[in-house]
């Protein structure tokens, strides 16, 4: 699993980006967490893994690779008190993969899971069928004109608040979108193989044996409601509602760093 790494000490942060992004989306957060090791893997079809075979796009396959990365980084070690030795953060699509890894028992019980704008999964066959059809249309558009697709995708109601990301991070991110290696075919495959419709419904499953925090932006009312509904099933879970929209790691970097620092204390 190719990853961008910012060196540091203490318990590491493993951070998974969202659809259309890459590992460098966490560079501003890594700067705010100076001294903390940050590993940002790139998901199949994105960044340096744009040429990954389609079998690697499967959500279970990506969750398995995340579990392997975390196990390799920790070397199987645990603290005597059971304190977290790693924080695993997943944003949006990355959050769905991180959550699946946790519910599959692929992350150590000593980890702390932080899900940013992550969907717990669609509950009905009708919802999944509709979402699958919607993603198929988006995938077709990505194959026809990747640049136009990304522009339209970024301007969608869910993501347009990312325009508030401070400089120079916003300009760097937009330049990567224009010049990065992720092709339309790769983005289309990601939509078809790893979209929300392909995710198991996690909402009513027993909680995994690790600590969980759900993070959303105050302006992202849909995912804030989903987070509260999900946490309501698991009284030990924490919910943090930060300023801004869906992409808290881009739009509310300082606030998200404030949530993470206590979890990363060794």
Image (spheres, rainbow, N blue to C red):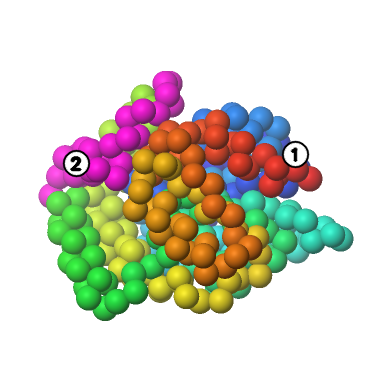
Q: Which mark is residue 152?
A: 2
**Mark 1 element type:** strand
What x and y, as percent, mark residue 62?
47, 63
As drawn, 261 above or below 232:
above
Q: Is residue 137 above or below residue 47?
A: below
**Dominant SS in magenta:** helix
Judge from the rendering whether residue 227 lies leftward or rightward of residue 163; answer left or right. right
Give the residue at x 75% y 39%: 9
> For the point 15% across and 59% down, which residue is it?
137
Identify the residue under disc 1: 9
Magenta segment boundaries in residue numbering: 143-169
Residue 27 in sight from this viewpoint: no
Q: Which mark is residue 144?
A: none
Residue 107 is a magenta residue: no
In the figure, residue 70 lies in which quadrant?
bottom right
Residue 166 is a magenta residue: yes
Looking at the rendering, in which quadrant would you find the C terminus? top right
Taking the spot 33% from the left edge, 64% from the top edge, the residue there is: 196
Q: Position of 22 compared to 214: left or right?
A: left
């Amino acid at each position: 699993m190719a990853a961008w790494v910012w060196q540091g000490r203490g318990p590491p942060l493993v951070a998974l980006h969202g659809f259309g992004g890459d590992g460098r989306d966490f560079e501003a957060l890594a700067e705010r967490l100076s001294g903390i090791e940050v590993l940002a893997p790139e998901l199949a079809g994105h960044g340096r893994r744009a040429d990954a075979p389609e079998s690697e796009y499967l959500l279970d396959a990506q969750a398995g690779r995340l579990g392997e990365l975390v196990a390799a980084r920790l070397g199987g070690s645990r603290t005597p008190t059971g304190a977290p030795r790693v924080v695993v953060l997943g944003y949006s699509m990355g959050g769905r993969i991180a959550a699946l890894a946790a519910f599959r028992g692929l992350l150590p019980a000593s980890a702390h899971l932080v899900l940013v704008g992550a969907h717990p999964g669609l509950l009905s066959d009708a919802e999944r069928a509709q979402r699958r059809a919607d993603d198929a249309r988006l995938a077709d558009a990505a194959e026809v004109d990747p640049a136009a697709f990304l522009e339209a995708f970024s301007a969608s109601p869910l993501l347009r608040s990312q325009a508030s990301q401070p400089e120079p991070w916003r300009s760097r991110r937009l330049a990567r979108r224009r010049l990065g290696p992720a092709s339309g075919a790769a983005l289309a495959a990601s939509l078809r193989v790893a979209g929300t419709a392909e995710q198991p419904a996690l909402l009513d499953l027993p909680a995994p044996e690790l600590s969980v925090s759900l993070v959303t932006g105050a302006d992202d009312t849909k995912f804030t409601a989903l987070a509260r509904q999900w946490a309501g099933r698991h009284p030990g879970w924490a919910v943090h509602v930060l300023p801004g929209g869906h992409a808290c790691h881009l739009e509310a970097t300082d606030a998200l760093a404030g949530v993470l620092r206590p979890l990363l204390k060794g």
